[in-house]
């Protein structure tokens, strides 16, 4: 039986609270400074809580694909399509929820890596002398052409059961820590957009605004202004991060809210459409079908 998930945990205890089959674990090999676990995940995983850890975390998808969702506890879901080569970087200070669903035969083969606090702080101090306590990891989702082969090397060392006393393990730990510090850290209080992605705090600011203003006109220019980016740059990094254009995201959020209203209330479909920003019933039905695969009437009839 899986243990009840606490809000905070450690890298050592992390596997107790996740789902799936562990097929390789660096702890069993005596690795020091690096917690690496290779997972075979079920095709469908319902919502579960991922505890926060003090160690920075890299989650690398080696094979398979899925529609993946994550959110702060009780917050707005972020939906992404993930495939081989996609990865997440975080040092979350709070727990978060995830769920996902893979097509048949495309179950996820995942590598989960935590860098121990000591080597991470050593790398921080080397890059930010005297300022390491004012630096934090910035959340990232996307592709990293340097980090990807490092993750593959880590997976191969796990498969080969290389013992922790090997110099290769120490070198790999230093390489992970150095790359994370160089690319995914920043002085607290500054705002920076990564190449290939948008920081999670900016993304959530956009999402919160969209959810609060579904009945109103929402423009790319207005969303870009929220996060102090040019419209073209905002549209580019938003799509890199979510796999959708900003307006596709708005459309999906509107239809998700419409589905909730249809499911939970007896309000007319015209009223539902108006609440999520569609004054034309025919346009609402057309967009609903594009996103949900059925018309609003068919969706209500199926409940």
Image (spheres, grey):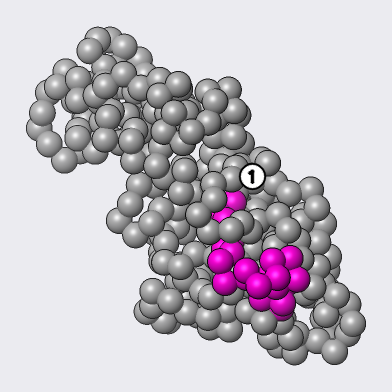
State which region is magenta: 119-140
Return the x and y of residue 151 as percentages of the image width and height: 76, 62
Indicate whether residue 72 is drawn in magenta: no
* 162 vs 250, nearest the viewer: 250
As displayed, is residue 33 above or below residue 73? below
Rendered residue at 38%/57% (across/down): 72
Rendered residue at 58%/22% (across/down): 232
Rendered residue at 62%/69% (across/down): 131
Indicate whether residue 136 is drawn in magenta: yes
Q: Quadrant of the N terminus?
A: bottom left
Q: Is residue 17 visible?
A: yes
Secondary-structure class at tag 1:
loop
- Horizontally, residue 222 falls left or right of residue 44, namely left
Return the x and y of residue 209 as percentages of the image width and height: 33, 35
Query: Which image quadrant is residue 8 in?
Result: bottom left
As displayed, is residue 162 above or below residue 179? below
- Horizontally, residue 144 falls left or right of residue 15, namely right
Numbered circles on residues, count: 1
> Pointer 1: residues within 10 angstroms few (<14), some, or many (20+)?
some
């Amino acid at each position: 039986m899986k243990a009840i998930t606490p809000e905070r945990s450690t890298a050592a205890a992390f596997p107790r609270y996740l789902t799936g089959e562990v097929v390789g674990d660096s702890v069993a090999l005596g690795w020091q400074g690096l917690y690496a676990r290779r997972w075979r995940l079920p095709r469908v995983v319902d919502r579960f809580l991922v505890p926060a850890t003090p160690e920075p975390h890299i989650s690398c998808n080696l094979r398979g694909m899925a529609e993946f969702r994550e959110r702060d506890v009780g917050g707005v879901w972020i939906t992404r399509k993930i495939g081989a080569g996609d990865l997440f970087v975080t040092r979350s200070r709070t727990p978060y929820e995830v769920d996902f669903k893979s097509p048949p035969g495309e179950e996820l083969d995942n590598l989960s890596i935590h860098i121990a606090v000591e080597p991470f702080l050593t790398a921080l101090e080397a890059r930010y002398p005297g300022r390491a306590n004012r630096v934090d990891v910035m959340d990232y989702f996307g592709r990293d052409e340097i980090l990807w082969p490092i993750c593959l090397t880590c997976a191969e060392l796990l498969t080969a059961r290389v013992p922790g006393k090997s110099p290769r393990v120490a070198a790999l730990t230093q390489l992970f820590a150095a790359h994370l510090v160089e690319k995914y850290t920043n002085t607290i209080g500054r705002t920076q957009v990564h190449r290939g992605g948008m920081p999670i705090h900016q993304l959530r600011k956009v999402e919160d605004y969209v959810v609060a203003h579904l009945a109103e006109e929402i423009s790319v220019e207005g969303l870009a202004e929220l996060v102090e980016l040019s419209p073209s740059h905002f549209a580019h990094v938003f799509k890199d991060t979510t796999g959708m254009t900003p307006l596709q995201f708005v459309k999906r959020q509107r239809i998700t809210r419409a589905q909730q209203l249809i499911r939970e209330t007896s309000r007319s479909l015209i009223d539902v459409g108006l609440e999520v920003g569609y004054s034309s019933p025919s346009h609402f039905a057309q967009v609903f079908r594009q996103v949900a695969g059925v018309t609003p009437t068919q969706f209500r009839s199926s409940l």
